[in-house]
Image (cartoon, grey):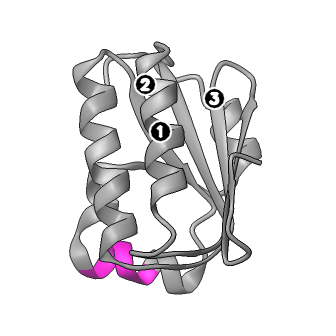
């Protein structure tokens, strides 16, 4: 596990054609740094596709949302993409209210995300 503060953790694994970041716990101002670091590391290493698995993410505030949005932009600028999977109701609602859900490719779950092999163009 890359970051595990007891309240939040990030685990980085290789998936089928993607790097997968599994998030657990509460993503907020006090816990966002491990996520930023893991995303930066993967983008700088040339990951073409990053899937952020949110199945065990119980909370996300604006700091966490901004970390994901910035990483999405950086990935796009580097020729890659950042996608989300398995947004749970409290987290999904925040993405819907802010309109951020429309800028991410969002999958129902990690299995669906890894099975989706859409072209690099989006």
Residue at image coords 56%, 83% = 89
Q: Nearer the viewer, mark 3 or mark 1?
A: 1
Q: Which residues are magenta?
A: 93-97
Q: Residues within 10 Å of mark 3 (few under 14, many from 20)?
A: many
Task: Indicate whether 36 appears above or below 79.
Answer: below
Asked if the residues shown at circle 1 and circle 2 are in contact, with their CB atoms under 8 angstroms apart, the answer is yes
Q: Which residue is mark 3?
A: 19
Residue 68 visible somewhere in the drawing: yes
Q: Regarding mark 2 in the picture, which secondary structure is present there?
A: helix
In the foreground, 10 or 17: 10
Task: Indicate whether 7 appears above or below 18.
Answer: below
Query: Of the residues under marks 3 and 2, which one precedes in the sequence?
Result: 3
Q: Quadrant of residue 71?
A: top left
Name the quarter where the C terminus is drawn.
top left
Residue at image coords 69%, 46% = 2
Image location of residue 92, percent across then percent down: 47, 75
The residues tagged by marks 3 and 1 sit, at their Cα atoms, a distance apart of 10 Å
Residue at image coords 51%, 52% = 35
Q: Residues within 10 Å of mark 2 (few under 14, many from 20)?
A: many
The residues tagged by marks 1 and 2 sit, at their Cα atoms, a distance apart of 6 Å
Q: Nearer the viewer, mark 3 or mark 2?
A: 2
In the foreground, 97 or 21: 21
Q: Regarding mark 1 in the picture, which secondary structure is present there?
A: helix
Q: Which residue is mark 2?
A: 43
Q: Regarding mark 3 in the picture, which secondary structure is present there?
A: strand
Q: Which residue is mark 1?
A: 39
* Residue 121, magenta (yes or no): no
In the foreground, 77 or 27: 27
Q: Quadrant of residue 121?
A: top left
């Amino acid at each position: 596990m890359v970051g595990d503060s007891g309240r939040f953790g990030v685990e980085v694994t290789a998936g089928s054609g993607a790097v997968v970041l599994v998030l657990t716990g509460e993503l907020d101002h006090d816990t966002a740094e491990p996520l930023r670091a893991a995303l930066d590391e993967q983008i700088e290493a040339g990951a073409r596709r990053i899937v952020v698995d949110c199945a065990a993410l119980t909370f996300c505030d604006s700091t966490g949302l901004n970390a994901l949005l910035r990483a999405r932009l950086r990935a796009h600028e580097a020729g890659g993409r950042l996608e989300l999977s398995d947004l749970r109701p409290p987290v999904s609602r925040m993405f819907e209210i802010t309109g951020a859900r429309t800028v991410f490719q969002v999958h129902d779950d990690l299995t669906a995300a890894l099975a989706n092999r859409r072209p690099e163009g989006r």
